[in-house]
Amino acid sequence: MHWTRLLGIALLVGGVILLVMGYTATDSLGEELHQEFMGRYTDDTRMYLIVGGVMAAVGLVLTIFGVRR
């Protein structure tokens, strides 16, 4: 297996973990209160969701199209 595919798998797994952490954080009491009064999620939760999505997308692309021979 080529190193780009291994990097892609690692990024995909890391991205999914961050997405799950961000999704779980949206259900916490503090996050729901912040969203109720401010109208949006906290910066930490948004960064988990954004960075996790980007990492998962890049990891998926590297895993699928990582090596062209």
Image (spheres, rainbow, N blue to C red):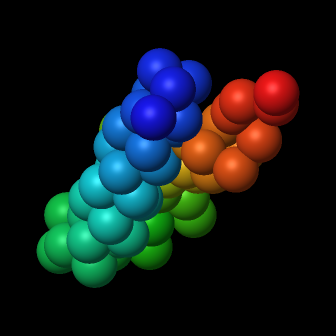
Residue at the image point whose x is 57% and y is 63% from the top: 39
**Nearer-the-camera pick, 63 or 33:** 63
Q: On screen, 69 above or below 34? A: above
Of all residues shown, which one is farthest toward the top?
A: 3
Rendered image quadrant of residue 28: bottom left
Q: Residue furthest left?
A: 29
From the viewer's side, name the closer residue of 42 and 69.
Answer: 69
- Note whether 61 is above or below 5 in the view shown: below
| 49 to the left or right of 34 | right
Give above or below for 56 relative to 32.
Answer: above
Question: Quadrant of the image for the C terminus?
Answer: top right
Furthest toward the front, the residue is: 69
- Residue lying farthest right? 69
Left or right of 10? Residue 46 is right
Residue 60: percent from the left, percent from the top? 63, 50
Q: How many marks?
A: 0
Residue 69 is at least partly visible in this image: yes
Which residue is found at the position 37% from the left and 38% from the top?
10
Q: Residue at x 45, y 35 (%)?
A: 1
Q: Residue at x 51, y 26 (%)?
A: 2
Is any atom of residue 38 visible in this view? no
- As displayed, is residue 36 above or below residue 9? below
Name the spot of residue 48 as percent of width and height, x first: 41, 44
Residue 3 at x, y percent in the picture: 47, 21
Q: Nearer the viewer, residue 29 or 17?
A: 17
Rendering coords of residue 62 (x, y %):
66, 37
Image side of residue 17 versus residue 30, left or right: right
